Image (cartoon, rainbow, N blue to C red):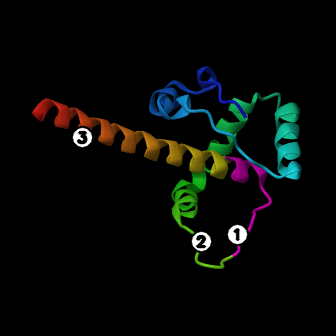
């Protein structure tokens, strides 16, 4: 799915501007992919709008949602896939955003250290 930043609310564009500049490939089972495409068609939404809807669907339980995304599975603990395709979409996109954000922060920190080393040298 390609994220079109211009379709996002202004506040979300500002927050995610740097993070969403890195493309990602999101993997879904064929059944979930078909359900997501059907939701786009039925509701007249673009894929970006569907992502916004997926996040909005988690608004009432946002703290619990973030805790679920951030809590790693225990060894040999099976991952239980929920039935709600919007939850799955929100979770997959959130994991992607967290990974990209982590890469950006790490990259920025490394650049700062490199710049300081050059300035001192």
In the displayed image of the protein, which residue is found farthest to the top?
A: 6
Residue 34 point in image, percent of width and height: 88, 44
Kindly identify the residue that appears in the image at 11 percent across and 34 percent down.
120
Write down the residue under mark 3. Answer: 113
Kindly identify the residue that appears in the image at 18 percent across and 32 percent down.
118
Left or right, 103 with respect to 110, comes to right
Disc 2 residue crowd, few under 14, some 14–19, many 20+, Cα 10 Å: few
Write down the residue under mark 1. Answer: 79
Q: Say whether marks 1 and 2 touch (CB < 8 Å).
A: yes
Q: Indicate which disc, 2 or 3, sits on the residue closer to the N terminus.
A: 2
Residue 37 point in image, percent of width and height: 85, 38
Based on the picture, tell me whether residue 115 belongs to the magenta stretch. Answer: no
Mark linked to residue 73:
2
Kindly identify the residue that appears in the image at 69 percent across and 40 percent down.
25
Secondary structure of the residue carrying numbered label 2: loop
Quadrant of residue 115 within the rendered picture: top left
Over which residues does the magenta segment extend?
78-89
Quadrant of residue 83 within the rendered picture: bottom right
The front one of 45 and 23 is 23
Left or right, 30 with respect to 110, comes to right
């Amino acid at each position: 799915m390609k994220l079109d930043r211009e379709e996002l609310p202004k506040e979300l564009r500002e927050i995610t501007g740097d993070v969403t500049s890195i493309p990602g490939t999101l993997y879904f089972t064929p059944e979930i992919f078909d359900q997501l495409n059907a939701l786009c068609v039925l509701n007249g939404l673009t894929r970006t709008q569907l992502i916004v809807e997926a996040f909005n669907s988690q608004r009432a339980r946002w703290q619990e949602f973030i805790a679920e995304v951030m809590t790693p599975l225990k060894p040999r603990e099976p991952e239980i896939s929920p039935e709600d395709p919007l939850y799955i979409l929100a979770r997959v996109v959130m994991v992607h955003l967290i990974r990209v954000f982590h890469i950006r922060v790490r990259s920025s920190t490394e650049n700062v250290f490199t710049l300081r080393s050059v300035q001192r040298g």
